[in-house]
Image (spheres, rainbow, N blue to C red):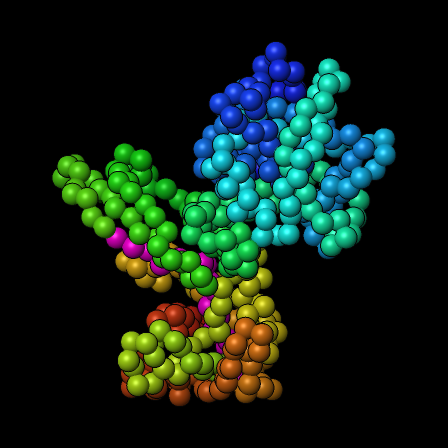
Amino acid sequence: MTDPTPVPAMQNASGTFRPAADQGKRVMAFYGTLRHIPVLQTVLGRVPASDTLAEGTMPDHVVYKVAGGDWPMIAHQPGAQATLLLLTDASAEDVARLSDYELGWGYTLERIAVRLNDGQEIEAEMFMPAPEAMVADGLWSLPDWAQTHGEQAEAEAVEFALLHGHMTPEEITARDGIIGVRATARIAAAKRPADPDRRVEDHVEEKWFRRAYANFFALDEISLKVRRYDGTMGDAMERAALWVGDAVVVLPYDPLRDEVLLVEQFRTPVYVLGDPNPWVWEPVAGLIDAGEAPETAARRETQEEAGLELDRLEKVAGAYSSTGSSTEFLHLYIGIADLSNVDSRGGLEEEGEDIRSRVLSFDALMAEFDAGAFKDLPLVTTLLWLARHRDTLRDSA
């Protein structure tokens, strides 16, 4: 992550920036994360012209880091001055998009005085926090925040922009957790290797794109053309993609006892399909939280669902669960653990989980597999890997 994009020093109305009076535009000021240009332009859905971005200061104020987090708050402090980023040509649409990003957190849009380089003051608008709801914990640094959180914040801003016009700011903010999960998945996907022989930009044409639904999951609809293998561009086709997030799958295995642990829980999609048995035996599985490493998520989910502390993780594979319908990418593991004392109940009540587990020998598990007892693909995948590498795991135990 590079340092935040620099902006020119604030000039007066006869200088380089476009004043708010032009075409009825408004001057918007930002003291915190929206000073990070990639986040700002993602929220706006446009790239502001360079002569409409500038810096100013807010006299007698300072920007602090909020205790318990790494986001900023601005507070009154005599003699101090807080650095601001100014957007001098904000339209009504810009303000609406910015409101979606800010108002759900309890911020209010207020008029403030901004000091320019020559000492004169102009009026701007800025989203202000409720100071009584926040406790300061040292000064906040934009470069430090951008280095640690900028990439995640930009990816989350993509979804805030997609939800603009479809939900209230409060409804968007209420989905912040799952928005962060999907943002982490978006970042991970962008870092996977590209096709060495085909540039996506040369082989795929988007006709239109829209977010059709968003809650715990999200659904995007798209019309696109894809270049065929004979070199011609194919006809436009309409498709959909279910947004889930990246997930971990862990099959706990005790190589000393040659035993495996499975968990069972009710699965709504299986029920909706009409399957008469929607209680499914599976490995441990769960979504990777915002900013969380897959290995960390694997250990956390195993503790939450099965009450197990893993000795180590053996990587099975990383793969999309259903490339024709879903964005979900699975990180599959065998979790080496002591299964001699396992509680049969697990899951988090606050997440609506009601999970039971059972431990069975590898041979018994394979007998059930051969009899067609299992219908969870991640279980089938990890079990087949375990069958192939079981002797090695037992030799090294």
Furthest-top residue in this view: 14
Look at the image and tell me whether residue 138 can be seen. yes
Does residue 376 appear to the left or right of 203 in the view shown?
right
Q: Residue at x 36, y 62 (%)?
A: 321
Residue 324 sits in quarter: bottom left
Say whether residue 248 is magenta.
Answer: yes
Q: Which residues are magenta?
A: 239-257
Residue 69: x and y in percent read: 70, 52
Furthest-right residue in this view: 78
Residue 193: x and y in percent read: 40, 44
Is residue 304 depicted above or below 205 in this figure?
below
Say whether residue 370 is magenta.
Answer: no
Picture quarter with the N terminus: top right
- Number of callouts: 0
Is residue 355 depicted above or below 129 in this figure?
below
Residue 382 sits in quarter: bottom left
Q: Residue at x 74, y 30 (%)?
A: 58
Residue 102: x and y in percent read: 59, 46
Q: Nearer the viewer, residue 108 or 355?
A: 108
Majority secondary structure in the magenta region = strand
